[in-house]
Amino acid sequence: MPDSTPSPTAHPPTARGRKTRAKLLAAAERLFGANGFHGTSVVDITREAGVAQGTFYLYFDSKEEIFRQLVRHLSQELRHALAQAVSGAEHRIDIEELGVREFIRFSAEHRDLYQIVSESQFIDPELFRWYYERLAKGYSLGLSRAMDAGEVFRTDPETLSYCLMGASHFLGIRWIAWEGREPPEDMVQATVDFIRRALQPSTDDEEAS
């Protein structure tokens, strides 16, 4: 698995440094999304970010490094956004609905997310695997707790986490990646309704809880 320890320049000590690094990451996100990894150069990124080329190497060792850090950054931002969106919900079924809607919102805001993460499997296969395993790890933990509370049917939580991630993922592909827009509300609601029905506890689960 890729080393998740930040590089020395991952979190610059000054506000100016953090702003510059953020500009480089934002530029890389736009360009990697539009042109792909191989179609983007360090010069392209620095030009897009409006910084000198030498400044790039104060924050990243190479194009490969900024790509890896971008995938980790997007993972962190997505997980943070999801945590914020569901923070007020108590029942797991409600958390699922809020999570689907926030994932769609985040993906629409970061329209190049699909392209970048998909390409990472060819640039750094271990990073690609880490991205999804990191999402599934927290998801599985929440589902396991919900099973213990009798809020959803009992099954293998890791397997269920990947099934649920897949539902939101492909909803986003169908509309955001292919159509360039958020899915219609009735499509989102259909996904939410499916998840609600699928997660209902079985009679055996209810009797055991």
Image (cartoon, grey):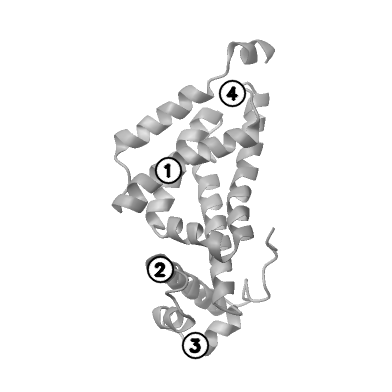
The residue tagged with tag 1: helix, strand or loop? helix
Residue located beneath label 1 in the image: 170
Amino acid on which the number 1 mark rests in the picture? Phe
- Nearer the observer, disc 3 or disc 1? 1
The image position of residue 89, as x and y in percent, is 53, 34
Q: Quadrant of the C terminus?
A: top right
- Mark 4 is surrounded, within 10 Å at the Cα level, by few (under 14), some (14 to 19) or many (20 or more) other residues, namely many
Q: Secondary structure at mark 4?
A: loop
Badge 1: how crowded within 10 Å, few (<14), some, or many (20+)?
few
Which of the two discs, 2 and 3, labels the residue nearer the N terminus? Answer: 2
Q: Residue at x 49, y 44 (%)?
A: 85
Marks 3 and 1, how far apart in space? 38 Å
Residue closest to the eye, 172 or 142: 172
**Mark-to-mark CA distance, 4 and 1:** 25 Å
Residue 68 image-quadrant placement: bottom right
Label 4 amino acid? Glu
Instruction: Find the distance from the CA under tag 2 to the CA under tag 3.
Output: 17 Å
Q: Which residue is mark 4?
A: 151
| Circle on res. 30 | 2
- At mark 2, the secondary structure is helix
